[in-house]
Image (spheres, helix red, strand yellow):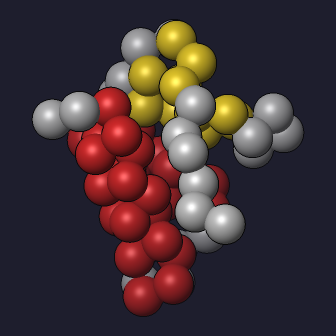
Amino acid sequence: MSDEELILQYNQKFWELVDDKGYSYRKARRILKKKYPSVYYDVQKEKWFINDHVYHLEEDK
């Protein structure tokens, strides 16, 4: 699985937990940390990290 696919899958699962199941952002991140230990999104910097390396995701505008 490519890095971009991994991020998109993580993001989709995150919003399913938040929107569909009503979890808080913090709870959803803790749940996904178990399934995706190498993926992290820094909200303040607005950057994705995979295995502690910055990954720049091209967003549709």
Q: Is residue 46 above or below residue 21?
A: above
Image location (x, y in percent) of residue 44? 84, 39
Q: Residue 33: in sight, yes or no?
A: yes
Outermost residue to the top: 52
Outermost residue to the left: 1
Figure quadrant of the C terminus: bottom right
Q: Is residue 52 above or below residue 4?
A: above
- Residue 24 sits in which quadrant? bottom right
Figure quadrant of the N terminus: top left
Image location (x, y in percent) of residue 34? 31, 38
In this view, the residue in front, 6 or 39, is 6
Q: Residue at x 58, y 31 (%)?
A: 56
Query: In the rendered view, does 48 fall on the left or right side of 6?
Result: right
Q: Is residue 30 above or below residue 28?
A: above
Query: In the rendered view, does 34 fall on the left or right side of 28?
Result: left
In this view, the residue in front, 18 or 46, is 46
Image location (x, y in percent) of residue 10? 37, 51
Outermost residue to the front: 61
Q: Residue at x 32, y 31 (%)?
A: 3
Image location (x, y in percent) of residue 45? 81, 33
